[in-house]
Image (cartoon, rainbow, N blue to C red):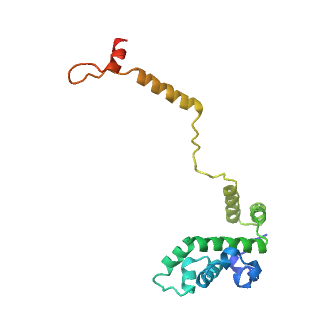
Amino acid sequence: MATANLATLPPSPLADTKHFAPSQRSQAYLKLRKRHKCFVDSYLRSFNQRDAALSIGSSEKSAGTIGARLCKNPRVAAAIEAEMQIRAELNGITSTFVLNNIRTIAVDEKTRNADKLTALALLGKHLKLFTDQVDVNITTDLADRVARARQQVTAQVIPMELDSGTVQPECREAQEQ
């Protein structure tokens, strides 16, 4: 099975948010102002903040800034997330579906090696095989050793003499030992 270019695939009739029935819209979307709804619809078609801002009448000069600001708006961001979730459910896109298709590409003998490598990389990322994080867990043994070392250092107080030449009282005991 050769992989198809996503641009050549026919769009799903439910992929475009214009075809959603009002009952299929999220509550977060329905609570938005009309301008924000138009931004969300445009953003979900292109996933481009600047183009979505242009579609609601922003100037060429400020479209990038306005698009970024609207995507950070909690209400707009919640609506985008909710609408994407609805879109995925209506189209039958689940994590199992995606992983099964990636696995199919990875093991298919007719698939190009570059596509197989990409599919395997995606599966590896999903399984967190390629994390660059270092696990830094301090065990109680190490914490106990540090505490004992601190106690030893404080027990070996070096006497400090005051300007007058007298030894501080707490250091006198250590000096006598």
In the image, residue 74 lies at what x, y percent?
Answer: 58, 70
In the image, residue 105 lies at what x, y percent?
Answer: 75, 64
Locate residue 140 relative to residue 15 in the image: left or right.
left
Q: Quadrant of the N terminus?
A: bottom right
The image quadrant of residue 37 is bottom right
Q: In the displayed structure, would residue 158 be above or below residue 65?
A: above
Locate residue 145 relative to residue 41 in the image: left or right.
left
Nearer-the-camera pick, 4 or 170? 170
Image point (66%, 57%), residue name: 125
Q: Quadrant of the C terminus?
A: top left
Give the farthest residue toward the bottom: 57
- Count of numbered tags: 0
Nearer-the-camera pick, 74 or 170? 170
Image point (24%, 23%), residue name: 162
Image point (50%, 81%), residue name: 63
In the image, residue 160 lies at what x, y percent?
Answer: 29, 23
The image quadrant of residue 97 is bottom right
Nearer-the-camera pick, 125 or 90? 90
In the image, residue 21 lies at what x, y percent?
Answer: 76, 83
